Image (cartoon, helix red, strand yellow):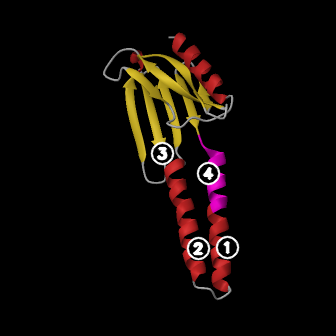
Amino acid sequence: MKVIAHTPDLLIVEDRPVFIAIMLIVFTLVFLGAGLGILAAGEWWGLVFAGLGGGMGLLFFAIFVRRVQVVFHRPDRYVEFRRKNVFRALKVRHDLRDVSRAIVERNRSSEGGTTYRVTLVFDTGESAGLHPITFAYSSGSGHERAARAINEWLGAQ
């Protein structure tokens, strides 16, 4: 998660799951390559291997790889969630005055690891409640930086 635009009138925070996208592409290509190699050796089940393995990789890519942008626009007083995956793009707009702050939610696993996600807190309006920027939790230090940038930008109103 990182801040890609930060001006007095505009703040854009973005999450691009590049690592998982690369890993899923490698997974898909390995299965496709192995299946085609088996097929080239004269075994018909190589086609099944390539189809199932490659198909699973593509399916997981479509499900888990989702670019998310949150645009805070002061002149028009809105905050807009933009989510895009292989199949569709979705935009949801809220009134900027309803957003009070950003928090970092933590999720502790049974193995002792901690993952994070940035969540916007809407105190008023139709959308009152918690609105996570990403649905999944992830590791890294970008969450704290993004939440701090959002809170500083909101405080400068």
Indicate which disc, 1 or 4, sits on the residue closer to the N terminus: 4
Q: Which residue is mark 2?
A: 49
- Provide the secondary structure element on which disc 1 rests: helix
Give neighbour class at mark 2: few <14, some 14-19, many 20+ (Cα, 10 Å). Answer: some
Q: Are marks 3 and 4 in contact (CB under 8 Å)?
A: no
Q: Vertically, is 122 above or below 50?
A: above
**Amino acid at pointer 3:** Lys
Give the number of the mark in front: 3 or 1.
Answer: 1
Q: Which residue is mark 4?
A: 21
- Provide the secondary structure element on which disc 2 rests: helix
- Provide the secondary structure element on which disc 4 rests: helix
Spatial CA span between label 2 and label 4: 21 Å
- Provide the secondary structure element on which disc 3 rests: strand
Indicate which disc, 2 or 3, sits on the residue closer to the N terminus: 2
**Amino acid at pointer 2:** Phe
- Residue 81 x, y percent position in the rendering: 45, 33
Does the segment drawn in magenta span residue 153?
Answer: no
Q: Which residue is mark 3?
A: 84
**In front here: 60 or 14?**
60
Q: Vertically, is 114 above or below 89?
A: above
Spatial CA span between label 1 and label 4: 20 Å
Q: Which residue is mark 1?
A: 34
**In front here: 97 or 59?**
59
Does the segment drawn in magenta span residue 19?
Answer: yes
Spatial CA span between label 2 and label 3: 30 Å
Q: Which residues are magenta?
A: 16-27
Q: Are marks 2 and 3 in contact (CB under 8 Å)?
A: no
Residue 79 in sight: yes
